[in-house]
Amino acid sequence: MLHLIDLANLRLSKLSDRYLLVHSDIESDLTITDLYQGNIKRSVKTLSGGESFIVSLALALSLADMASQNVKLESLFIDEGFGTLDAETLETAIETLERLQSESNRTIGVISHVESLKERITTQIRVIKGTGGYAKIEVV
């Protein structure tokens, strides 16, 4: 767990300069240190939707890093979460994923309804709702 937190903090520092993850001895829970609020420690449950997404993304990418030490991971999928981000944080998250893709040569799939992502994602698989409960898949 401590290794995961160390890796996540490296990722998190590239996404936001505000938080550090800390392992809490109480109930083996995660807490965050808020560097903008005098280094106060608080529960991750107090994070906003966008902040939670950034911390979750850092943890997910770190888990993928740990897993890929033993096996080759060729893909990573991220489902939603982007809608909770402000424009600046969304840009940082997208740049992080683009950098990860180019550095690791992984396929990164993003499942989202955020319109601004369409401009940044070059290959898209769109699911278009049809009639009678059917859907059409379109590769763009």
Image (cartoon, rainbow, N blue to C red):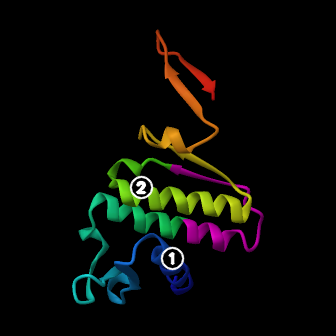
- Mark 1–mark 2 Cα distance, whole angstroms, equals 18 Å
Query: Residue placed at 37% from the left, 59% from the top?
Result: 88
Q: Is residue 23 above or below residue 89?
A: below
Say what secondary structure mark 1 lies in.
helix
Q: Is residue 61 above or below residue 39?
A: above
Query: Residue placed at 45% from the left, 69% from the top?
Result: 15
Disc 1 versus disc 2: nearer the observer = 2
At label 1, counting other C-alpha atoms closer than 10 Å, the crowd grade (few under 14, some 14-19, many 20 or more) is many
82 on left or right of 95: left
Q: Position of residue 49 (x, y in %)?
A: 30, 58
Q: Are marks 1 and 2 in contact (CB under 8 Å)?
A: no
Q: Which residue carries the number 1 mark? A: 8
Q: Residue 41, labelled with which disc?
A: none
Residue 90 or residue 72, whichever sits in front: 90
In the picture as drawn, the residue positioned furthest to the top comes out as: 132
Quarter of the figure that contains the C terminus:
top right
Magenta stretch contains residue 17: no
Residue 70 or residue 48, whichever sits in front: 48
Mark sitting earlier along the chain (1/2)? 1
Query: Residue placed at 51% from the left, 22% from the top?
Result: 128
Q: What is the total number of numbered labels drawn onto the structure image?
A: 2
At label 2, counting other C-alpha atoms closer than 10 Å, the crowd grade (few under 14, some 14-19, many 20 or more) is many
**Residue 109 seen in render:** yes
Q: Position of residue 36 (x, y in %)?
A: 26, 82
Q: Write down the region rendered in magenta.
A: 61-78
User: Hey, what amino acid is under mark 1?
Assistant: Ala
Q: Which residue carries the number 2 mark? A: 90
Residue 35 or residue 31, whichever sits in front: 35
Q: Is residue 86 above or below residue 25?
A: above
19 on left or right of 107: left
**Residue 29 seen in render:** no
